[in-house]
C-alpha cells in the first residue's frame, strides 16, 4: 500500500523577530482499506523538519542543516555565531579561511526576512527558550537558534581532565535571549527538565543533552566501580553542581545504544 506524507506543525517557539516551528510528516494510506478484510499496515517512519521564520531577525544553523530558504535572507560564515556581517561574500570568505587554517566551519548565520527549512530527519526536535543565560549543548544535538543568541564554544575538560589528558571536549555554547532547537532520538515529552537549586545531580551515562552554563560540571568515580574505573574506564558518573537547569533523557537507552545523541531512531 502506498502512503503520502502529510505535514503538520506540532511544536513552536517564538522570540523577537523570529519563530521556530517543528513540522512533522505523518504517513497516511493513499487508499481506503477494503471492507470486510483485515489489512495490517506497516506505516513508514515519521519525519520532522524545522522551519525558521525570520522577520528582520537573526538565526544560526549547524552547518549542513539547511535544505532551502525563501525570502530576503543573507548567509555568513561566523566563528562567533550571531555577530558580524558581509552577506554571501562573507560566507565564502569564511569558508576559504576555514579551509586554509584547517579549522572546521562551525556555524552559519542567517539575517533578514523569510523562512528557512532544515533537512528532514527521523530524530525528534526539542524546542526551548533562553532568558539572558548560557546553555551548554551535547555535541551533535544543536540544530538552530534564533533571536539575540550567540553560539560559541565551550571546552569541557570533564573526563579528559580526570584521565590526565590535556585536551578537553568542545561543545556548542548558546548565550543570550531567544529560542533554540536540539535533536535527539528521544521524544520531547520524555525529557525531564530539572531545576537544580544549589543541588548536586549525578548521572550514570550520556543522558544529558544540555545544561545551564552556571552549573559546575565534573566527572567523578562512582563508589560502586572504583576498581573497574582504574582498569577499563568504567565506573564514572557525570556530576552537576549549583543552580540551573538540566535537560535529562532517561529513556535514551531504550531508543538507541547510549553512545551519541546524534544517532537515528
Image: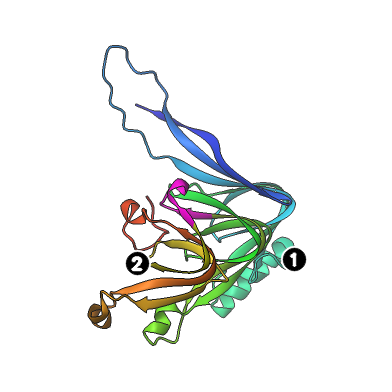
Along the viewing direction, whichever of 150 and 198 lies nearer the viewer: 198
Label 1 sits on a secondary structure element that is: loop
User: How many residues crowd mark 2 within 10 Å: few (<14), some (14–19), many (20+)?
Assistant: few
Does 92 appear above or below 32?
below
How far across and how far down the image is residue 23, in percent?
Answer: 54, 41
Does 75 appear above or below 104?
above
On the question of residue 152 being in view, the answer is yes
Along the viewing direction, whichever of 186 and 118 lies nearer the viewer: 186
User: How many residues crowd mark 1 within 10 Å: few (<14), some (14–19), many (20+)?
Assistant: some
State which quadrant residue 100 falls in. Answer: bottom right
Instruction: Residue 85: give its label.
Output: 1
Residue 61 drawn in magenta: no
- Looking at marks 1 and 2 on the same chain, the residue that comes earlier in the sequence is marked by 1
On the image, numbered disc 2 is attached to which residue?
204
How far across and how far down the image is residue 79, in percent?
Answer: 63, 72
The answer to whether mark 1 and mark 2 are in CB contact below 8 A is: no
Query: Which residue is painted at 29% across and 78% down in the image?
Result: 233
How far across and how far down the image is residue 191, in percent?
Answer: 45, 52
Label 2 sits on a secondary structure element that is: loop
Span shown in magenta:
182-193
Residue 191 drawn in magenta: yes
Instruction: Residue 152: give its label.
Output: none
Along the viewing direction, whichever of 195 and 210 lies nearer the viewer: 195
Mark-to-mark CA distance, 1 and 2: 43 Å
Does 248 appear above or below 95?
above
Does 233 appear above or below 57?
below
Amino acid at each position: 500500500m502506498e502512503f503520502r506524507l502529510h505535514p503538520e506543525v506540532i511544536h513552536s517557539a517564538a522570540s523577537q523577530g523570529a519563530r521556530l516551528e517543528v513540522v512533522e510528516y505523518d504517513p497516511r494510506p493513499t487508499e481506503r482499506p477494503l471492507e470486510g478484510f483485515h489489512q495490517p499496515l506497516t506505516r513508514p517512519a515519521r519525519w520532522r523538519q524545522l522551519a525558521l521564520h525570520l522577520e528582520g531577525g537573526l538565526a544560526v544553523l549547524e552547518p549542513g542543516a539547511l535544505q532551502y530558504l525563501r525570502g530576503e535572507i543573507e548567509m555568513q560564515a561566523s566563528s562567533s555565531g550571531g555577530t558580524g556581517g558581509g552577506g554571501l561574500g562573507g560566507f565564502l570568505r569564511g569558508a576559504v579561511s576555514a579551509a586554509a587554517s584547517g579549522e572546521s566551519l562551525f556555524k552559519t548565520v542567517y539575517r533578514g526576512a523569510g523562512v528557512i527549512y532544515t533537512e528532514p530527519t527521523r530524530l525528534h526536535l526539542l524546542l526551548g527558550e533562553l532568558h539572558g543565560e548560557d546553555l551548554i549543548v551535547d555535541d551533535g544535538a544543536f540544530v538552530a537558534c534564533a533571536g539575540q543568541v550567540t553560539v560559541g564554544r565551550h571546552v569541557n575538560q570533564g573526563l579528559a581532565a580526570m584521565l590526565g589528558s590535556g585536551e578537553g571536549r568542545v561543545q556548542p555554547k548558546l548565550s543570550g535571549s531567544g529560542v533554540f532547537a536540539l535533536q535527539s532520538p528521544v521524544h520531547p515529552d520524555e525529557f525531564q527538565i530539572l531545576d537544580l537549586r544549589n543541588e548536586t545531580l549525578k548521572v550514570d551515562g550520556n543522558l544529558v543533552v544540555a545544561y545551564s552554563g552556571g552549573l559546575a560540571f565534573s566527572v567523578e568515580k562512582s563508589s560502586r566501580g572504583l576498581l573497574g574505573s582504574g582498569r577499563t574506564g568504567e565506573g564514572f558518573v557525570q556530576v552537576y553542581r549549583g543552580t540551573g537547569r538540566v535537560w535529562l533523557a532517561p529513556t535514551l537507552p531504550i531508543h538507541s545504544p547510549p553512545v551519541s545523541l546524534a544517532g537515528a531512531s
